[in-house]
Image: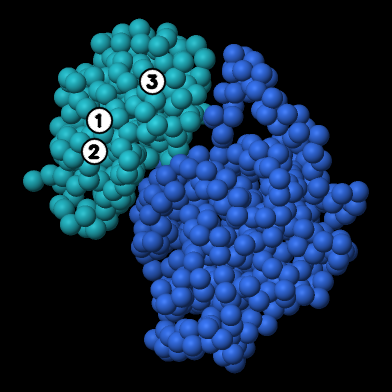
Amino acid sequence: MSGTLRLTVAELFPGHLMLNGDMGNVAVLAHRATLAGAIVDVIRIERGEKLPDRVDLLCIGSGPVSAQRAIATDLPRLRAPLTEWIAEGVGMLAVNAGFHLLGLSVQFRDGDSIDGVGVLPVATIATDAQIVTDEFVVDSDVGRLIGIENHATRVELLGGEPLGRVVRGVGNDGVSEGVRVNNALGTHLHGPVLAMNPSLADSMLTRAFARHGEHYELTAAHQKIDAVAHSAREHLARIARVPVDAP
Amino acid sequence: MRTALVPIVFVGKLLRLAARLRGGGSAFPGWVVLKLMPDFIARATAQLEHGVVVVLGSNGKSTTTNMVAGVVAAHGSRVFTNPTGANMPQGVASSLLSQLTFSARLPYDIGVVEVDEAYGEVICAALRPRAGVILNVQIDQIYRLFEPDRVAGMFERIATHINGTIALNRDDPFLAALGDRLAQTPGHDVRWFAVAPEVLAAAPHGQVLARNYAAESIASDPAAHDLAAHDSAAHDSARLRRTTPVITEVTSSEGRALGYRWREHRSTVQLSARGLHNAVDAVAAITLSEAALGSGFVIDTAERALSSLKTAYGRGELIVVGDRTVEIVLMKSLASLQMNLDAFESPPDSVVMAFDEHSRDPSWLYAADLSIVQHVTYVSGPKAVFLALRLLYAGVTYDQLNTDVVRAVQHVLDGPRPPSGVHTLILDYDQMIIVRRFLGYRDLEAGAA
């Protein structure tokens, strides 16, 4: 790396959207960027708090319906800045409720619905049954993604590209999973999806470095972590009876 | 009533014997008996002269049940209780089978029963408890329970089956709201326990309670607040909570020492395990025990019982092996792990962490603050790699990975004695059972030598 790169990784609504280890994704991005030589600032943006002028990476996690309702009135103000950031190529990772809330609308089980931020082209409707897949497998542009899904929603894609194709589990609708608009990703792969799928983390980091004219390069320390991540992926792939990498 | 039970108990006991000869499956006889006689639990427990009290909550059920059973027994009652983990219908039925005589007599005065939240309604409908405690609502087992609001709903429905006193944690935003509603319903006597505000403020992660976002929006949104003010029930409820006194309060928690206030009485007691979570369980146990015993309750007797109890199975348990002490710390969920870590007075200097295949969805490990654990000797268990990956991102180093927890524990015991003399084993439930069995065997060996 030529100079000293300073990156800002932001977490949106961490006090509300933190149901199950989604904060791990921020830790993964920050740690891998640091190993690659960047100085990383992690900031938390809670309900009603001002957005910074710029960020390099943004993560949004999942939360219960009550938390989604509690932040509903704070969503419209995000539309303009997030639209701009996505157009600029800021990397975003939105998981479960965070994913749905960046979409156009979310309809809850009681029939009530709220408007989302409207920057991802999806509409979400609650399902009666909870969808839990302990070994959720999705094939994407950056290879096979392996993790866990736990939600009670059906997501309709109204544009954009899905993040991938479901190999095992349900995802959006049993066939497609998640959405991708430029470098903004929405997914049901919950918890520390980036820890389990370093290729996805690295694709986000490569673009974030490139926007500063820097090259993101893996080190021996990355490789040591990734050997462990590979074993964890193999563990779930073995139970799912699928190969750990896409054919 | 009892005669109808006799053949069922006979069949159940035979099944228990068969299951034990095969080495395991302790809930199976209970399952069969409930198939044969769906109201078995109600019939068997109807014999208890002083009825049943129940213990519920996301975490701390086994410890609190153990404490209440100990306190009530110290007052001279014969206490029926279910062993740790046997808190679903088939488990409760199996533990009843083990204690019923062949003539279907249940030779106890009172039941103290731990109840799983997801089965709470059906179990409490059968037990008809006359008192109960709900300890906390935490983010727990989301692969099964999905979200804390849903668990709070379960507790709300369970509470309608408890006819009498219900002891609730006033620091818990879901239970505070539930208690306010119950206090206005005839037939419910709500009694609060709590942690003194300054003690709570000093705890690194409080009680790791789930947030009640719906209640927060009513409190913070001025428009909603006005609406609530017009709604006399909601208004009364806010006023009620402020004026209903806390019966039992944690006034200090340092290591194993609990300072507490019960009504006007203030005292200190040494508990069997350290940490604020054990302190909260103890004040919950005092509150429920008083409800169970009524005017017969004597605080000094309760205090003596609490200070002489053994830890609940595998919860902060200390086992001496030669010149070492082995401490077992349970990591069942984010809350149980975090509260246990927060109770450490200094970083542990010899650590084995193990995760079993039965622990589904280890995502919550990423929500835990592991900073007190600076170094781990062994990561272990069938899911050791998931622990290892988390530790690497937390900046916690580890020496070795071995999926066989018995070998890992054997190696640390054969290795050098740590300066503290304590090996800390941080284990999930299934790995705890394996390690405990292994250490029990060693104890026998040492005794024989």
Q: Which mark is residue A171?
A: 2
Q: Please state which of residues A170 and B49 is positioned toward the viewer in this rendering.
A: B49
Chain in blue on the image? B
Write down the residue under mark 1.
A155
Mark 2 belongs to which amino acid?
A: Gly
* Percent x, y of residue B17: 46, 88
How are the residues colored?
by chain
In the displayed structure, B282 sits above or below A81; it is below
Q: Local crowd at mark 2 within 10 Å, few (<14), some, or many (≥20)?
A: many
The reply to whether dot 2 and dot 1 touch (C-beta < 8 Å) is yes
Tell me whether marks 2 and 1 sit on the same chain: yes
Q: Can you tell which quarter of the image residue B208 is in?
A: top right
Chain of the residue where label 3 is placed in the rendered structure: A
Q: CA distance from mark 2 to mark 3?
A: 21 Å
Chain of the residue where label 1 is placed in the rendered structure: A
Chain in cyan on the image? A
Residue B117 visible somewhere in the drawing: yes
Write down the residue under mark 3.
A114
Q: Please state which of residues B444 and B183 is positioned toward the viewer in this rendering.
A: B183
The reply to whether dot 1 and dot 3 touch (C-beta < 8 Å) is no
Residue located farthest toward the right when viewing the structure as drawn: B264
Mark 3 belongs to which amino acid?
A: Ile
Indicate the secondary structure of the residue bearing disc 2. loop
Q: Local crowd at mark 3 within 10 Å, few (<14), some, or many (≥20)?
A: some
Query: Horizontally, is B81 left or right of A209 in the view?
Result: right
In the displayed structure, B160 sits above or below B442; it is above
Q: Please state which of residues B139 and B121 is positioned toward the viewer in this rendering.
A: B121
* Percent x, y of residue A173: 20, 36
